[in-house]
Amino acid sequence: MQDPRRIAELLLGAIEWQTQVSGFCRCPGEAFHTSGNGRKDCRVNVDGAPTIFCFHASCVSAVAEANRRLRRELNASPWELRLPDGRTLRSGDVLQAGGVILPREVLKARARAEGREAGEALAGGHLFRTSFDEKLLLESLRVNAERFRPELFDFFRWPMAEILEGSPLLVAERDAEDQFRTWLKLWPACSTVWIGDVYSSGKPEHRTHFRPVSEWYQIGPAMGNYTCGSSFKPGCHSRSNENLSGHRFMVIESDTLSHDEIGAVFAFLRRRLRYEMHCIVDTAGKSLHGWFEVPPNKVWENRLKAGLEVFGCDPKVFTYSQPVRVPGAWRNGKLQRLIWLRQ
Ligand SMILES: [Zn+2]
């Protein structure tokens, strides 16, 4: 029976194995890199959905092509790998952090259950196959994110001081009114935006917290410390999901990462995954919030969510009616403010 690692080596050249199934390799698109190459920039995993992942963005199409070849070769015939402790890992199984083996049958069962929930069972084999592949990919993505997490913080290092210094528009020193109005300009003019405190929602008297951008512009930041990354239907009084309308931002935050660490996640989203970043808000507390464009669809959203959770981001960021700190309001004597703003 073929050793999957030999197959990967035949395709990619020498691999510096870090675990039984994951190691650093030379990027198949290295010729396209526009910045210096590091030994740990590119990683290959043969378990789960076999994947090559490189931190550089300029090589994506070469890496995608190599991924297709790697999967074709590794899926051509089933393989088994004897681990040092005597257990056996089979093709399609995922070797999770901490050494737990997630068997492919479990992933299949989960995909089948989810497919049924989504009403896909009626459509038969094809959709099941798609949802199984996606499930396997998500699970693989989670373990991959776990594996390359240490390199992420190194490769995309973007500490607070550099964020402040590198802002395309200098915003950090502006006063409260200016902070608030500058932030309002990120919204399309017709949007209805909620501003209040966490409980300023749900009753008819809270309608006054949902206003068009132009009205907020006149009023200023006086009506609360929070807003949402989403706009709402005009005239509503509740921050519930069914009242969301039109424009949305994805607001990335973390309760566990420091100011200097979360910057690496922002840089990764921006430079590697090419999400447009609109601004970074210093919440005048422990965290920084990055305001990004939202993923193009549910599939990408789920993938991004899986990765971001592993990096230490708050899964609440994908609840689009979640309250977040609004720039221009004061919190215990400190100003919630923009520290980075796009041109
Ligand atoms: Zn690369």
Image (tube, grey):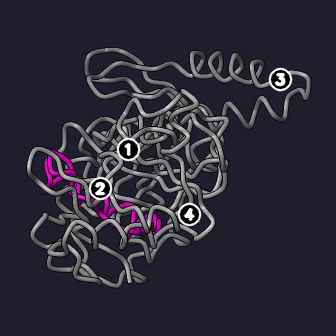
Please identify the quarter of the rendering in which residue 221 is found.
bottom left
Mark 3: few, some, or many residues within 10 Å (few <14, many ≥20)?
Answer: few
User: Which mark is drawn over residue 64?
Assistant: 4
Say what secondary structure mark 2 lies in: helix
Cβ atoms under marks 2 and 1 closer than 8 Å = yes
Mark 4 falls on what kind of element? Answer: helix
Magenta span? 258-287
The residue identified by callout 1 is 308
Query: Is 329 positioned to the left or the right of 186 in the image?
Result: left
Location of ligand 1 given as a quarter of the image: bottom left
Give percent across and percent down for residue 182.
36, 73
Badge 2 density bin: few <14, some 14–19, many ≥20, Cα 10 Å: many
Closer to us: mark 4 or mark 2? 2
Identify the residue at horizontal 53%, vertical 47% (top origin): 210
Tally the marks.
Answer: 4
Indicate whether residue 88 is drawn in magenta.
no
Find disc 3 in the rendering and name its residue.
Answer: 119
Label 2 sits on residue: 265
Q: Secondary structure at mark 3?
A: loop
Amino acid of disc 4: Ala
241 vs 216, left or right, is right
In the rendered structure, are the residues bearing label 3 and label 2 in contact, judged by CB atoms less than 8 Å apart? no
Marks 4 & 1, CB-CB < 8 Å contact: no
Determine whether the beta carbon of the residue marked 1 sits less than 8 angstroms from the nearest atom of ligand 1.
Answer: no
Residue under the point 84% across and 21% down: 121
